[in-house]
Image: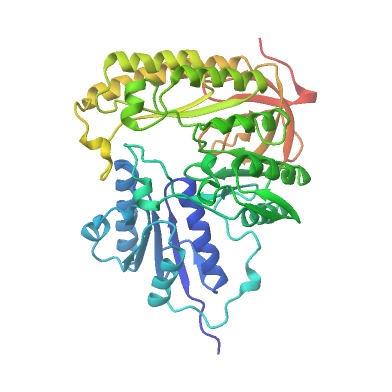
Amino acid sequence: MSNPVPKVGFISLGCPKALVDSEQILTQLRAEGYDIVSSYDDAQLVLVNTCGFIDSAVEESLEAIGEALDENGKVIVTGCLGAKGDIVQQTHPQVLAVTGPHALQEVMDHVHQQLPKPHDPYTDLIPAEGLKLTPQHYAYLKISEGCNHRCSFCIIPSMRGDLVSRPIGEVMQEAENLFKSGVKELLVISQDTSAYGVDVKYRTEFWGGRPLKTRMTELAAALGKLAREYGAWVRLHYVYPYPHVDEVIPLMADGLILPYLDVPFQHASPRILKLMKRPGNIEKTLRRIEDWRAICPNITLRSTFIVGFPGETEQEFEELLEFLEEAQLDRVGAFAYSPVDGATANDLPDPVPEEVQQERLERFMQLQSAISAEKLQNKIGQTMQVIVDGFSEDNLLLGRSSADAPEIDGAVILDQVEDEVTPGQFMEVKIVAATEHDLIGVPIEDATIDD
């Protein structure tokens, strides 16, 4: 008589980098013959992959752990919150084990202790691309772990360590496996994508019998060429503004990778940027943005900013607004500074009162909303390719253009689509209207623009 298959529940929180960690753990669990279940009642053990970057993420993670303990009772915790001292054990002493992020083997060791693996792992049931938590038509490709920067507001290096680049052949093999499985959009992620290969001195390896340098530009070009074979997109995220980032812009202009650049500028005041330990030459940044647009006019620029950083004056905040006006970025995220345990910025003088932070955040987003709305209006009448995501909860058919990354950007609402479409399918549409955040497009043959 065969032994019952051990069943594991899984909760994944946090950023796309944490999501990839979750996918790796899930893949290993299935490779060893564990069954992944979606309810507490069916699970013999629950894994919670946490986020610990900002206070709200810590609170969400602790609540998720508490719920898992209440509903199931057997919980193993992994992820960034596990690297923040003993906060998990202090809040939930009942947890069975706690690890930090990117700790696949350690997690599996704890699982084995609590729920021994089956004697016959069904390795033939695992697809080459592994198990994914994203929809089938897009996937994240993590190219490195850790970060060499020491931004004063950030504790990621203390949780995930210094930069460790994955071998480029391994990255390319995973990308090919994903494309072969039907993935139509590959989102390249890491803590610092543009630093890829720095730790191995841009070592040359081999892929497909040809030499390939472990470096962002060469990787982007190789991924773009591979994606063309499968009719797929490649999108770059988390690109620190090193000078060599300029090299990927021609690849975007040539259509090899999507004309989309996610660059976290964080602020515009030279003094605040210095306190943040970030690049501080804003005039040079504006010139680079101008050059990027000259080379690739349809480039979409996304960035993130922190308002209310310790010591930020009203004049320095006004400098940030001026930068926003001049840069005319397409996609912007912002949040008010909040102290993170272990961040050196916590020791800076003159913290900005919370009410001032919120007032500045509202002013910032109001300005950016106006910029974004105008940019969306200017797209009315344009023809663009979109990838179909599927139906929303409101039964709207949604797609995304090259300007829209999943989860964080807007969407293209697809109207008057009479033929059956599936997620991952590409369509040519004409933009006929725009809302505050999204575009509305119709198939080319049905396009008439609203007055």
Q: Quadrant of residue 155?
A: top left
| Residue furthest to the top | 451
Q: Quadrant of residue 95?
A: bottom left
| Quadrant containing the C terminus in the rendered view | top right
Q: Position of residue 227 (x, y in %)?
A: 72, 44
Q: Quadrant of residue 421?
A: top right
Does residue 259 show up?
yes
Residue for point 32% across, 22% down: 271
| Residue 259 horizontal side relative to residue 1, left or right | right
Q: Position of residue 312 (x, y in %)?
A: 27, 22
Q: How many marks?
A: 0
Q: 137 or 225, which lies in front?
A: 225
Q: Position of residue 328 (x, y in %)?
A: 52, 17
Q: Position of residue 126 (x, y in %)?
A: 62, 67
Residue for point 23% across, 23% down: 355
Q: 189 or 247, which lies in front?
A: 247
Residue for point 46% across, 19% down: 369
| Residue 105 horizontal side relative to residue 399, left or right | left
Does residue 339 show up?
no
Please, is residue 350 above or below residue 175 in the view?
above
| Residue furthest to the right | 445
Please, is residue 287 above or below residue 402 in the view?
above
| Quadrant containing the N terminus in the rendered view | bottom right
Q: What colouring does the structure picture have?
A: rainbow
| Residue 190 horizontal side relative to residue 95, left or right | right
